[in-house]
Image: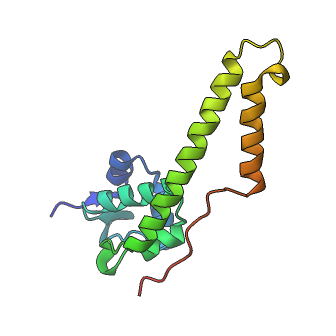
Amino acid sequence: MKLLDIGEVAAQSGVKPSALRYYEEAGLITSVSRHGMRRQFAPDVLLQLNLIAMGKLAGFSLEEIAAMFGVGGHPNLPRDVLHRRAEALDRQIHQLISLRDTLRHVADCPAPSHMECATFRRLVNLAGKRVGRRETVKKPKRFNSS
């Protein structure tokens, strides 16, 4: 097995060496040896880094992501937590699509004043009701990996 030094991992993954050291300190990845002062990693670290990036993008904290890695850094993904996060993302996507459509309408509205536009007023009222009901995307509850 050819090991990758920290510079190669950084170049291939786009993750800065300082972040790689931090991830190792946090228990997200593990170096397998050193060549001089340079950390050496197994090639699987690139898959782990992709999973970490996906987890961050999905809104998981590094602590939550670390809990998703089992023994030896292999994924131990809690399906129920992933389902809940996917549902939260669906709600967020719906809200963002509505927001996008509202912004496009406002940008293209031919009314002399937005306050004279019935569609604008309706969209603003709908958005206000959503905010009033606190329809925000909530992070999933923390979980234990045991």
Would residue 49 appear left or right of 124 to someone viewing this image?
left
Asked whether 40 or 142 is in front, the reply is 142
- Residue 130, image x, y percentages: 71, 50
- Residue 95, image x, y percentages: 60, 45
Would residue 94 appear left or right of 30 to someone viewing this image?
right
Would residue 6 appear left or right of 43 to someone viewing this image?
right
Toward which corner of the image does residue 138 lie, by quadrant?
A: bottom right
Residue drawn where x is 66% and y is 31% of the image: 102
Q: Is residue 13 shown to the viewer in this render?
A: yes
- Residue 62, image x, y percentages: 52, 67
| Quadrant (top left/top right/bottom left/bottom right) for the C terminus | bottom left
Asked whether 1 or 71 is in front, the reply is 71
Residue drawn where x is 42% and y is 66% of the image: 82
Q: Please say if 14 is above or below 33.
A: above
| Quadrant (top left/top right/bottom left/bottom right) for the N terminus | bottom left
Residue drawn where x is 36% and y is 49% of the image: 13
